[in-house]
Amino acid sequence: MEKYIEDWFYVIKNCSVENTYKMGWSKSIVECCLENPKLNLISFDRISEKMFKYYWNQTIFFDLQQSPNPNKSPKFITYVKDQIDLYKKRFGNKPELYDRISHQLNIDVKHLNSILKQDVSHRFLKVSGEDFDLYELNQKDRTVMVYHPDGVKYWKTSIHHREYLKRSEWLTFQKVRT
């Protein structure tokens, strides 16, 4: 199990990062495993929704830059920004956490799945020419089968956990005061 966790952290720490897709992808898979450690089959639908949530929260509050090219936002981020614009037109400019307003949004998860299929899913497991066997990717069915979903519960006690948190560059919203 320790080797499996070490491989996850190695991939996260050393993957090429043209934008934040790979970090969102990995964080989403880990979160799915933490939510249900017995379920090893994760749909792109779940991953897309989680990634949308991360990008929504980062963008609506801070408009964080998600790629090195400020003139060309990644497609996933562009979609999130478009949804934020629609939300603001309908409900006003007050930023809200995704979990509070998700029921008011109409997210095209299939579109987001297509972006993940094209731009993220097949690239994550390869680092410096080496393939890592962390999960089985089925692009046709748009699923990820994690080999040890219960293993992620050990991440919090792992020596690599802090490194993951530093590398992932994700904000934690502990409490937003209204």
Image (cartoon, helix red, strand yellow):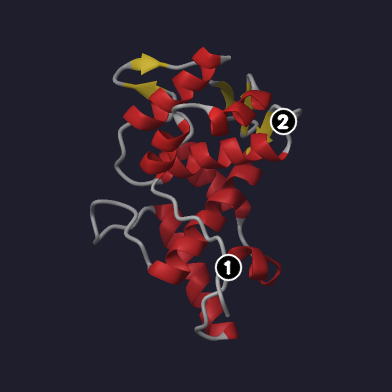
Secondary structure state at the residue bearing disc 1 = loop
Residue at (64, 20) in percent of width and height = 148
User: What residue sits 50% from the left and 84% below the top?
Assistant: 93
Q: Is residue 39 left or right of residue 3?
A: right
2, 149: nearer the viewer? 2
Measure the C-alpha gap from mark 2 to mark 1.
26 Å
Can you tell which quarter of the image residue 119 is in?
top left
Q: Which residue is mark 1?
A: 97
Residue 161 at x, y percent in the picture: 47, 33
- Picture coordinates of residue 167 (x, y %)? 37, 40
In the displayed structure, 45 sits above or below 159; it is below
Q: Is residue 177 above or below residue 120?
A: below
Placement of the N terminus among the 4 image quadrants: top right
Outermost residue, right side:
38
Q: Amino acid at mark 2?
A: Pro
Number of labels in the image equals 2
Image coordinates of residue 32 in percent, x first then y, are 65, 39
Q: Measuring 59% from the left and 84% from the top, which residue is drawn there?
A: 91
Looking at the rendered structure, the kind of residue marked 1 is: Leu
Q: Nearer the viewer, residue 103 or 155?
A: 155
Q: Which quarter of the figure has residue 162?
A: top left
Q: Which residue is mark 2?
A: 37
Q: Say whether disc 2 or disc 1 marks the residue closer to the N-terminus.
A: 2
Q: Secondary structure at mark 2?
A: loop
